[in-house]
Every structure is written in C-alpha cells, then in structure tokens.
Amino acid sequence: MLILAIDSSTPVAGVALLRDGILMRESFINFKQTHSEMLMPLVDETLRGCQTSLGELDALAVTMGPGSFTGLRIGMAAVKGLSLAAGLPVVGLSALETLAHNICFTDHLVCPVFNARRQEVYGACYDHRGPYPRLLGAEVACPAEEFARSALQLARQQGCPGIVLLGDGYEPYQEIFQSQLGEQLKIAPAHLMLPRAAALASLALVKAGREQYEPVMTMRPRYIRLSEAERKLGKGEL
C-alpha cells in the first residue's frame, strides 16, 4: 500500500511517502514559511523525488486536530483537493496521537503537548508500551499547570516511572512543567520533539488496512476548543 501523509497541524509542515511499511521519503520544515506557501510544493517534491504520481497512491493521510486552526484548514483543504482529483480515500488521525507515535516501547507515560496560546496547551496522555500509542483519557485544552497535575496523577495510577513530554507546547511553559513534574519529567530529543509526517503515515497504514477512512466531503478539523472569533461571538463581543 502506498500512502502520502500530510501534516500541517502545527508550525511544522510535513509530508511523507510510505510504501508497504517502508518510509520512502519525508520532508520536514519548521522555518518561517506559511503552510499555504510550502505544503503543495512539498507534496510535489516528495512525489517527484520518488518517481511517483498521484494516481499511483492508494490513500492519503492527514492530521485532523487539535492544533493551529489555520494550519489544520490548509492541510485538510489540500488533502480534500488531492482526494477528489485522484479519487483517493483519506485516513484522518489525531495530531496528538501522531506526535505521541514518535516514541514507542516505553513504560513511561507519553504526553504530547501543543502550544494552544492563551496560556493553554492541547495535550493528551498515552500508554506506549507497544508499537502504537493507546490514548488514556481524553484530548484536552487547558492551562499547562492543570495538564501537568493530571499527567502526574495518571502516571502514578498507571505505575509509570516517568513522563515523556514532547511538542511545541513544552518550551513556552517549561518552568511550569519542570516545577510540577520534577525528576519524573523526561524531554524528548530534538529529532523526536515535533510532529513527523512519517509517524502519521505509519499510523495511517494501520487504519487504511482496516479501511477506516473519513467521509471526504464532510470531514472537518477537530479543534477541541472554540476559535477566537467563536469565543468572542459567544460573549457578544462581535
């Protein structure tokens, strides 16, 4: 099975091509350019670099959220366009689950966190003793301190010796995480710290094998919380 994976849920733009479980190519950019500028050129570069056409693909994969509202919309629009153009099914996955998949075969609690702005993070906790992450609880949007307390409590309940944090939600709130988690805190190294399209493709291969596809015409980003405009509208500020 040949899968093209596209991730734009965070400031990172990522595209990967996976054939039958073998990673053929991955592009990763975390530098200034907007997703609207970089995403489709990365797709073209990836396919051309592997001498592959859109028509040869078996499926597409995309992160559905949570994450950057604009980034998620751009990624989903790109995947919808490619899907409709080539008649390809689409696998949709959690951006947090995708990030958690950077780590595996550990008895530590794996906790991906994205910077959600407004002094909050998007986060989730995973059991990753096996090759694929298993969600414990729910994905949340909350203050970093609240997330750290919840993760610590869950780690104790699960008998985990430590907590691995990864994602762009760590750096802005590192003092909070360090204070709350202490010696149990483990930080992922740079090459595992941010979302990888290769991890998305790996997870998508499993779902595609089960034919767990999204309805392309109606699939929507999963934001978890209201956008700034929706929040203001609810308060009567717009």
Image: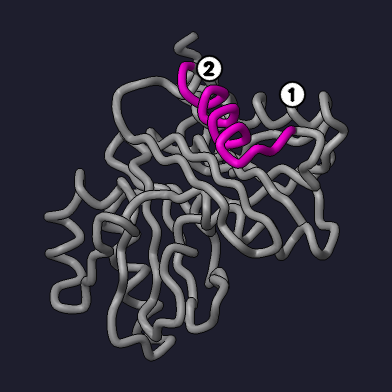
Location of mark 1 (residue): 81
Q: Where does residue 235 sit, x and y in percent of width and height?
A: 48, 21
**Main SS of the magenta segment?**
helix
24 and 7: which one is in front?
A: 24
Of residues 137 and 18, the one drawn nearer to the viewer in this rendering:
18
In this rendering, position of residue 124 left or right of residue 60? left
What percent of the width, then of the height, locates residue 55?
Answer: 81, 34
Amino acid type at circle 2 is Leu
Span colored in magenta: 37-53
Residue neighbourhood size for the residue with mark 2, other residues' Cα within 10 Å, grouped as few (<14), some (14–19), many (≥20):
few
Relative height, residue 151 to residue 12 (above, below): below
Q: Residue at x 73, y 48 (%)?
A: 91
Q: Which residue is drawn at 28% across and 80% down?
A: 162
For disc 2, the marked residue is 233
| Dot placed on the residue nearer the N-terminal end, 2 or 1 | 1
Q: Residue 226 appears at what percent x and percent y?
A: 53, 32
* Relative to 49, 167 lies left or right: left
Asked if the magenta segment contains residue 52, the reply would be yes
Is residue 143 covered in magenta? no
Going by the numbered disc 1, the residue's amino acid type is: Gly
